[in-house]
Amino acid sequence: MKIPMSSPDLNEADRQAVMDVINTPILSLGPRVLDFERAFCEYTGARHAVAVNSGTAGLHLAVRACGIGQGDRVITTPFSFVASTNALLFEQAVPVFVDVDPVTGNIDPAQLSEAARDLANGGPAAEKWLPRRGAGAGPLKALLPVDVFGQPADMDPIMAAAREHGLKLIEDSCEAIGALYRGKQAGSFGDFGIFAFYPNKQMTTGEGGMIITNDDEAAGFMRALRNQGRAVGDTWLSHTHLGYNYRLDEMSAALGLSQVRRLDEMLARREEVAGWYAEGLQGIPGLQAPQVVAETTRMSWFVYVIRLAAEIDRADLAKRLEARGVPIRPYFLPIHLQPYMVERFGYQPGDFPVTEDLGRRGVAVPFSGVMSREQVEYVCDALRQELGRA
Ligand SMILES: *Cc1c(COP(=O)(O)O)cnc(C)c1O
């Protein structure tokens, strides 16, 4: 058996929705994007939804809408996909990393509160949070937590810190569409929530992303920026702002609309697959299944990341599983140790020990909403046999 790492959940209605667009001449700047945005407002309860052509583009527009610029500081997490930090670097801002909670992998709220206080006060107490070089001299402007693997960050203390210090809050919910924190939608807590629709995400548009916000002015600004800076009232080839081409095309929007209509059903299937894994992995030595904070969280399963015991050779295990047709992937490689980050900010191994530990021991196993029970059992059996032998 050969198990795919992930597969999009596509049905006939999805394919037909894309075909319907291709049969018209309107392939961009048409009605589908508006319909998709409206459906997203309904799903999340947000006042505005702004569709863009990637989650990264969405993060970048949110950073611009916050007025974050050169040397400004933003508290964020090193345990994430690089896009959450890159969106800050695009504007020459300084990501100030805070280590993560060892259970969830989400930013540690106690350390975040302490860092926000120290950075807001300035002086020597702020120094310990800053990188060795390239720390900038700007004020602390915002918090940028990430809802890792589909589990929302601990938003209550994060929002309290934002309020206390007058900070903007950008929630990277690119891995958590449909997740709930104390009954409220992931992405709906801060000034901006961002979602992503790459094919391995819970729902897909091929490439695509969405920003939600209740801020009328910011929504208008982001709509202008995604369309080359053309503001409402600008005539053809007149541009109020420096903008980008971050537009989502009509085929992608039509697919997104079709997908969001059955999102809850797709999330339920993913939940079922996660349940099969939880059962099938029981009692296998040397691995730990993902942990969900049940008091606060309804999970939206993005990937299924298990943790290996420290003594297990992950690369060797990957090789042996690959030979059985079971791919696994390390998740995440810490952002602060990416070569361009080391060069720019002087980070060293040991700077964020929990992130590094999770990064060394975490592996995503094959996961999607279209996996069969038989496939999940095959993966679990392969893990049981290889780890039993290790
Ligand atoms: C997927 C993802 C993004 C956005 O990815 P795109 O490929 O640009 O759509 C951003 N942040 C996180 C944490 C992600 O997982």
Image (cartoon, grey):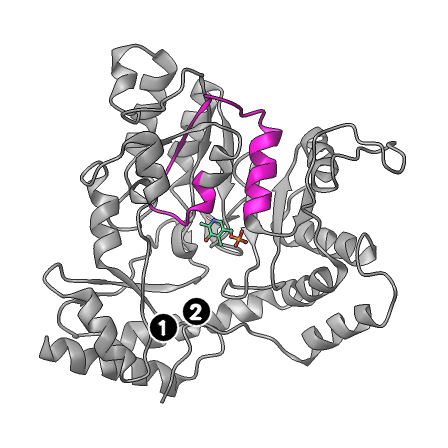
Would you say the residues marked 1 and 2 are in contact, meaning their CB atoms lie under 8 Å apart? yes
Ligand 1 lies under 8 Å from the Cβ of mark 2? no
Q: Is residue 201 left or right of residue 119?
A: right
Find residue 140 and report its horizontal and vertical position in percent. 43, 20
Find residue 274 and report its horizontal and vertical position in percent. 37, 70
Q: Is residue 139 above or below residue 186?
A: above
Find residue 288 and report its horizontal and vertical position in percent. 21, 64
Which residue, given by chain and number where applicable, does mark 2 sit on? 271
Towards the viewer: 222 or 179? 222
Q: Residue at x 39, y 81 (%)?
A: 3
For mark 1, does the 10 Å Cα neighbourhood hold few (<14), some (14 to 19), or many (20 or more) residues? few
Mark-to-mark CA distance, 1 and 2: 6 Å
Q: Residue at x 64, y 47 (%)?
A: 45
Q: Residue at x 28, y 85 (%)?
A: 324
**Residue stretch rendered in magenta on the structure:** 56-85
Which residue, given by chain and number where applicable, does mark 1 sit on? 275
Which numbered dot is residue 26?
none
Q: Is residue 287 left or right of residue 245?
A: left
Location of residue 378 by image quarter: bottom left
Residue type pointed to by label 1: Gly
**Is residue 57 highlighted in magenta?**
yes
Secondary structure, mark 1, is: helix
**Is residue 314 highlighted in magenta?**
no
Q: Residue at x 86, y 32 (%)?
A: 234
Q: Is residue 305 left or right of residue 230?
A: left
Secondary structure, mark 2, is: helix
